[in-house]
Amino acid sequence: MAFGSAASIFDSFDPTRPPPSDGVRSPISGPITNPAAGKDELPARSSIRFPIERRRYPRFSVEPMYTAIKVRFLDRDTFDYEGHAYDVSEGGCRFELDRGIEMGTPIAMQLTLPTMQSSIAGPGRAIFVFGNVVWLEDEDEPGPIRMAIAFTRFARAGDRERLLAELRTGRYRAAA
């Protein structure tokens, strides 16, 4: 049995072992004693989860119908596709368009958060980013196609700071 591996920890779990004198043990190493109830509570093995957060930045949910995006391929000069964002972070965005874009495709995106439309006048209203499509929903379903972009860089000086300032306002809730 190798020390430190998850399998070895679970294999050594013995629910018949008495709890330590202080009445508290980890759910991995043994029962948890509830001193108020006076009995042991054993978590089911399947209820123990070790979520691994792979994202580097926290995501925030946005109202899709109010969060307009425009997308263009890098070999084009105009934003030919319009859609809506579902969530956004400093590192990327989940969005939908009427047309799917192949994973790995580099694109440019214009993102306008709902409160930015009214609080900032002029060219500062939108955030411009470059990135690559990293996720694509099944295109066989009818309707708009959801995708995700991983930002590779912000297009203009100040775009990153404007996005972060907007996300820090507390108007947006953390995405699941």
Image: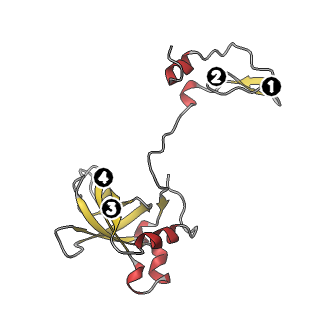
- Give the CA separation, mark 2 to mark 3: 45 Å
Q: Which mark is residue 132?
A: none
Under mark 2, the amino acid is Ser
x%, y% of residue 76?
Answer: 17, 71
Which residue appears at 51% of the width and 24% of the height? 6
Q: Nearer the viewer, mark 4 or mark 3?
A: 4
Q: Does the CB distance between marks 2 and 4 fall below 8 Å?
A: no
Which residue in the protein does label 4 denote? 134
Whichever of callouts 2 and 1 sits on the residue coming sooner in the sequence is 1
Which residue in the protein does label 1 denote? 22
Which residue in the protein does label 2 denote? 29
Under mark 3, the amino acid is Glu
Which is nearer the eye, 139 or 24? 24
Which residue in the protein does label 3 denote? 96
- 151 left or right of 27 in image: left
Dot 2: what SS? loop
Residue 144 falls in which quadrant of the image? bottom left
